[in-house]
Structure formats: C-alpha cells, structure tokens
Amino acid sequence: MAAVLITVPGVGESITEGILARWLKPDGSLVQAGEPLFELETDKANNVVPAGSTGVLKIAVAEGQTVAIGATIGTLDPAATPAEVAAPAQAQAASPAPASAPAASRPAAAAAAPDDGTAAAADAGVPLAPAVRRLVAENQIDPSRIAPTGRGGRITKEDVLAYLQAPAPAGEKVETLAPSPATALAGDASPQADTTVQATGGDRSQDSRATTAGRETRQRMSGLRQRIAQRLVQAQQTAAILTTFNEADMSRVQDLRARYKELFRTRHGVGLGFMSFFVKAVVEALRNYPTVNGRIDGNDIVYHNFHDIGVAVSTDRGLMVPVLRNADAMSFAEIEKAIAAFAEKAREGTITVDDLQGGTFTITNGGTFGSLLSTPILNPPQSGILGMHAIKKRPVVVDDQIVVRPMMYLAFSYDHRIIDGREAVSFLVRIKECIEDPERLLLAL
C-alpha cells in the first residue's frame, strides 16, 4: 500500500496558514489512526490534529515552520516498519550538517534527538494533554514519576509544575535536564507567566536566540500573539473608543455565594463564581440597551437579537475569548460549567476556533491578577466590553453613615460611533443595579 500523505487541515474559513508547533509522535514511530499526531498553531487557537490512518510516520516539515492549509508535512506508511524509517533518519542525523543550515530545517536530525518522554508516557499508559506533553518534553521527565490528580488518572499541568518544584528525596536524583541557554531565555511574557514558566523554557515552537552576549533575546511572535497584536491595533485605529467607570457594592453577591456555594457545588458539581452573576447582569443590561449588543458594518448598524457573551481567558500563550452561545438562555450552573470547560481547554491547548468565533459582547476580569482599575480595549467588531476588577474593602457612605463595604470598580469601554455617552453610562448603571441587588436577576426585574 502507498504511503498516506499528512496534510494540514482547514480549521476556519479565514485561516490560510499556521505554525507546525509540535509533532506529538517521533519520526519513524508507528502511529495508530485517531492518535494525536501534531499540534497546529493558528492566529486564533492551537489545534491537536489526529492521525487519519495507521502507519509509520515520516516527518517532512520540522517544528516551528509556517505551513499553508492543505500542505503536505509528512506521510504515514502502512507497509513500512519503524526500523525501516528510523535507520535513514539516524544515518542522516549522524552526518555533519552544513554550518549555514538552520536547525529547524533538519527534521531528521531533530527526530534522532533523545526521547522527549512522550514515548515513555505511551508505554506507561499515561494520557497527556498537549500542554502537559510540552512541559514533560522540555524538562525530559519520566511521566510515570508524576502523581496524577486529574480526572481519570490524567496528569495535569499543575502536577508537572509541582513535581518540578518539589525537593528530591534524599539519595534520589530528580530526572530532569536543564534546558539549553537559548531555551532558558525564551520566557513567556504573558501576564500570568512567572519564574516557573520561564524555567521550563516557554513555547518550544518559537524561534528564540540570544544576542549581544546574552544581553538581549530575540523571539518570534507566535501566530496567536501576532493576531492579538493586529486586533488590538485594529480596534484602536477603527473605533472611537471611550471608557466610562462606576463601582459596585459586592456585599449582596458575596452573601449569596457564602450561603449557597456548598449546596450549589453539591447540586451542580461546579463552584459558584462571580462571573455568572456578571454574565447575567450584562445580558439584562443588553436587553435594555440593544445598541450595545450591535456592531457597525460599513454605513449600517447591525443589531444582534441574540446574546453570545465572550469571556476573556488568559493563557500562557496569550489572551483567548471563548464564547458562551445564547447566554441569555443559560442558567447560573450552565454558565459556570461552560466557563470551567473553556478554561481547562485553554490550559491544555485544545480550544478550537469554533469556541472563539463570534460573540456580541465581551467580559474581561483583570481582578484575577489584582488589577484595581483599567480601560479594556474592544474586541472587534464588537461595540462594548466590560472590565471587572479586584474586590477591595473601602469606606463608603450608606444612608449618611460611613461603612466598610467590598467594592469593585467597573469599566465599560465602548465604540462612541454607535453608542452615545448617556446610553453607555445608563448601561453600566444597569449592570451595577443588578449586581448590588442580585435577586432581580432571578426575577428578571
């Protein structure tokens, strides 16, 4: 039987290319149909692509290369054996490569590198998500040594980080290898990145190299980061962005959560967070001010008769905004479950383009990182975005008395071309009213 071509699949109408972020199987290995084969990074999300058939893998394009949709990046040969493919690869890796050839252009040499730990994981029957597999490979860890805490015995990213941070028992050597200097410098500069992420080398798919005797590091922007940059500039250049502020007393919401959080978790299997209250409040405010739920298209205003709410999620690869479809029809429990599922998919790198497309309004929570106040930027082509912030106890005047209350600053950025100032202020006041009197959300008042 002839070898089956491995091609880059289409992942969205507007996407024409992506970055081959990572091969999930080594060159020359036997791959079963349906097994995760490679990771494709696009300007919207990372996609894990499974093998379309069973066969021995022959890699034609190295990790980190930009590939067009439909391009051939390798083959799966059902008639070959792993030894037949591995022998030429090893011979090619042993021969000296031209000094001018970049490492990324020699997939055979890369395939002959030491086992990255994924094969050991497969032998041990340990299921690894893409983000976990990347950490394991970068630190050359034996997955069988990591105690899994995820569902179904899965190893989570937190399990790997805990293993790396835990001191080794007396007389035992921790089985990790230090990353190369170039990798160690390729830290992720996202808001939630810390020294742990930098120590693990950031994203291996990115080209990072030290210059000027280690005083600078030049790193290619990922496709996702490039798209974020383009959209932020687009928003600033094409919309008349203005921000209005208010503050909300979170006492009633905190009291409700304190009273019902255990019962809520027992009944629904998920925690009761603040985001579900704000999603409900935003939907209620959008019903009162439908222009905020619209967008400009040329010389027309498009009014959306549905409420698809984007919830910003920060990951180690940048900001993603998965969308809650028909949020107006969702219960508190359904909202919390959907947000939890999106957050897990974003951490594991399995979020899809469909999860991110669309949306009529966005909510972002800078308070997660301690932000007290900010001016969020629109998510084009949307006309409004709500910024939540940290809850701080502050003295406020209630019934002519100074009392201490948990307060949150709210920021509403909007496109002044379509939304007038009075409408914007009234929209934010409506959200404030719903948060300060959350029973109104339940009664739709």
Image (spheres, rainbow, N blue to C red):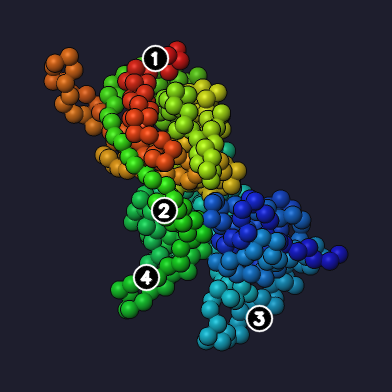
Mark 3 or 1 closer to N-term? 3
Mark 1 residue crowding within 10 angstroms, few (<14) / some (14–19) / many (20+): some
**Location of residue 105 by image quarter:** bottom right
| Amino acid on which disc 3 is placed | Ala
Q: Are marks 4 and 1 in contact (CB under 8 Å)?
A: no
Mark 4 or 1 closer to N-term? 4
Q: CA distance from mark 2 to mark 4?
A: 30 Å
Mark 2 or 4 closer to N-term? 4
Q: Position of residue 291 (x, y in %)?
A: 46, 31
| Amino acid on which disc 1 is placed | Glu
Residue 217 tag number: 4
Q: Nearer the viewer, mark 4 or mark 1?
A: 1
SS at mark 1? helix
Q: Which residue is mark 1?
A: 439
Q: CA distance from mark 1 to mark 2?
A: 40 Å
Q: CA distance from mark 3 to mark 1?
A: 71 Å
